[in-house]
Amino acid sequence: MISIILAITFLIFSYNEMMPRVSYIKAMDIYL
């Protein structure tokens, strides 16, 4: 469980570097 959460957060951080906010919203939509 923890490793999955860390992987998701890492992906969100890497996406934020490329496209801020928009990618974060998309990731949240996919996760929820």
Image (cartoon, rainbow, N blue to C red):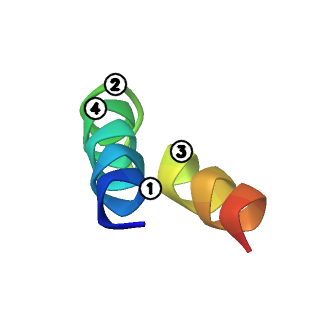
- Inter-mark Cα distance, 3 to 4: 10 Å
Mark 4: which amino acid? Ser
Q: Nearer the viewer, residue 9 or 25?
A: 9
What residue is pinned by disc 1? 21
What residue is pinned by disc 4? 14
- Inter-mark Cα distance, 3 to 1: 6 Å
Mark 2: which amino acid? Met
| Closer mark to the observer between disc 3 and disc 4 | 4
Q: Are marks 3 and 1 in contact (CB under 8 Å)?
A: yes
Q: Mark 4 Cα within 10 Å, few/some/many (few <14, many 20+)?
A: few
> Which is more N-terminal, label 1 or label 4?
4
Q: Mark 2 Cα within 10 Å, few/some/many (few <14, many 20+)?
A: few
What residue is drawn where x is 41% and y is 33%?
Answer: 19
Q: Are marks 2 and 4 in contact (CB under 8 Å)?
A: yes
Q: Secondary structure at mark 4?
A: helix
Q: Are marks 2 and 3 in contact (CB under 8 Å)?
A: yes
What residue is drawn where x is 32% and y is 41%?
Answer: 16
Q: Quadrant of residue 28?
A: bottom right
List x then y, in percent, for residue 1: 42, 66
Mark 1: which amino acid? Arg
Q: Secondary structure at mark 1?
A: loop
What residue is pinned by disc 2? 18
What residue is pinned by disc 3? 23
Q: Quadrant of residue 25?
A: bottom right
- Inter-mark Cα distance, 2 to 4: 7 Å
- Tell me if 29 is positioned left or right of 17 in this view: right
